[in-house]
Image (spheres, rainbow, N blue to C red):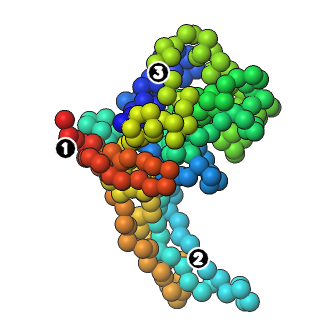
Amino acid sequence: MINYTERIALLMQDIVERTPRLSFIDLKEVLVFARFGRTEAEGAFATCHCMTIPESEPGYYYWRDRATGELTRRSEWFITKSPEVRVGLTRVKYLISFVLPRFCDQSLERSRKSALYPGAAPWLAKLDTIVHELYHIDPDESGIRRVARADGTNSPRSHGPMFYEDVAEMVTRYLASNPSPALYDFLKHDFDTLNAKEGGVVSTTFSNFPSFPQRYMQAVDMPMPDAAVKVERLKPLTQPVRYTEDDLHIRQFTDSSTRRLTRKGRYCAA
């Protein structure tokens, strides 16, 4: 069976080495994993998740009566934090997730990317998505790369026309550098073809699949501004706040479901 996320990680290494604008990326600090998503469903093909966002300032939620506007209750004080992810001694700073089988079945045809690649093969949409997610990694490690407006100021959005054009330019230059086709040939097949050709598609996931490391709220002890208002306690955490290589599993993906195969950490089968 083909390990799809492993193949993407190998391709990413070659892309980073051949693309000056991405050369600052240390892929030992980037973990590639898969999430499930049907081809016919709406949603992203891939997502870049930053694990280095600082914890937030303390805050709380509050509720008001719709009729009177009177404050009726509030949550306890909390901060939001990113979980820690480590593989061996290395702290992972970014996660990049690919949604299978949806990612495998994307095409340039009828997509807004097609105008950036006139006459290109349909599978190039997948290479564009991979470079796109790598380009989200901020050189300053302060979060997701900020997008500049035409006047040079930062946009609150994580995408913009120049972002897509930059990605297309990097994809074109990468292919012009004559990389080995063996690194990207797997992108040429849709999910069903790849599944039949390779005898199955597997990928790295987290042990709490379908969940994965995400920001969480942690209660902090601070005085309430109005002691007379009812305080709602935060719900107990149900997901880990620290992950290691022992929390990585291998799952097989089909067009309608997944199943766990082996553990990938120190207990990984030989």
Residue under pointer 1:
267
Could you tell me how many numbered marks the image carries? 3
Q: Is residue 86 left or right of residue 60?
A: left
Q: Quadrant of the C terminus?
A: top left
| Residue 62: numbered disc | 2
- The amino acid type found where label 3 is placed reads Leu
Q: Secondary structure at mark 2?
A: strand
Q: Residue at x 50, y 62 (%)?
A: 58
Q: Where is residue 90 drawn, in percent x and y?
A: 31, 35
- The amino acid type found where label 2 is placed reads Tyr
Q: Quadrant of the N terminus?
A: top left
Whole-number angstrom distance, CA of label 2 to CA of label 1: 46 Å
Nearest the camera: 49 or 12? 12
- The amino acid type found where label 1 is placed reads Tyr
**Which is more foreground, mark 3 or mark 2?**
3
Label 3 neighbour load within 10 Å: few <14, some 14-19, many 20+: some
Q: Secondary structure at mark 3?
A: helix
Whole-number angstrom distance, CA of label 1 to CA of label 3: 28 Å
Q: Is residue 241 above or below residue 197?
A: below
Upstream in sequence: badge 2 or badge 1: 2
Residue under pointer 3:
183
Q: Is residue 85 left or right of residue 158?
A: left
